[in-house]
Every structure is written in structure tokens, then in C-alpha cells.
Amino acid sequence: LRGRTVRLQGFVVHPAPGATQLARMRITCCAADAAPVKIDLAGAPQAADLPADTWIEVAARLRPGTATEANDHVPTVDVLALRIVPPPPDTYEH
């Protein structure tokens, strides 16, 4: 993914003051085992003002090496564009 622009959709999460993440719930078997897939958003000050659970789409570039054991393997992306989108019919990733 180095140097490539990707488009991601998910909902806004604010895990701590001043931090904003895009998240999506991943299901392996059933809703009971759903687990969040999270991405730290950098360079998107407008995301900090969005309420939690707002669905967004971002065009972004990965910051290589940012997903480490120290941060629970949550990568950071530099946001190039952001827009609010309606929630998808199925909000889970299967």
C-alpha cells in the first residue's frame, strides 16, 4: 500500500481527546464475535468535530510502520479527502 491512495468507509470513533479513528466491525462467524477494525486519521481536523458514529468515507494514504504492538496494530493514514456518507445497508464486514 506504500504510496497508494485508498478509499475507506466506516464510522467515527473518538478513543481519547484529540484522537479520531475510522472503524468498522468485522464478523468472522456471527454478530457475537464482531470486533472493530480501526484506523487512526491524521490530517483531518474536520473529523475531530464529527459526532461519534457518523459514517464517513476517506481517501487516504497509509503511513508505513505505524501499526505496531504498542498501539494494538492500529495503522495511521493521512487523510486526503473526507465526506459524510449514509450508513451502508450492512454495517458489518464479513
Image (cartoon, rainbow, N blue to C red):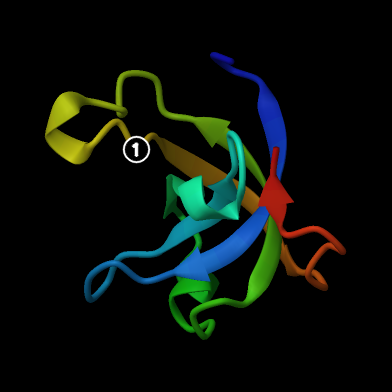
Give the left or right position of residue 72, taking residue 23 as reference.
Answer: left
Residue at position x 22%, y 25% from top? 68
Local SS, label 1:
loop
Q: Is residue 72 visible?
A: yes
Please state which of residues 68 and 31 is positioned toward the viewer in this rendering: 31
Please state which of residues 7 and 92 is positioned toward the viewer in this rendering: 92
Q: Quadrant of residue 15?
A: bottom left
Q: Quadrant of the C terminus?
A: top right
Judging by the rendered image, the residue that carries numbered circle 1 is 74
**Residue 16 location (% of width, % of height):** 22, 70
Give the total of numbered labels: 1
Q: Quadrant of residue 83?
A: bottom right
Tell me: residue 30, above or below residue 54. Answer: above
Give the left or right position of residue 77, taking residue 24 as reference.
Answer: left
Instruction: Please state which amino acid type lies under the numbered disc 1.
Output: Val
**Residue 17 location (% of width, % of height):** 22, 76
Please state which of residues 22 and 28 is positioned toward the viewer in this rendering: 28
Residue at position x 52%, y 68% from top? 12
Q: Is residue 58 visible?
A: no
Residue at position x 57%, y 32% from top? 61
Tell me: residue 78, above or below residue 31. Answer: above
Tell me: residue 20, above or below residue 80. Answer: below
Please state which of residues 9 and 43 is positioned toward the viewer in this rendering: 9
**Residue 93 location (% of width, % of height):** 68, 43
Is disc 1 surrounded by few (<14), some (14 to 19) or many (20+) residues within 10 Å?
A: some
Residue at position x 56%, y 76% from top? 53
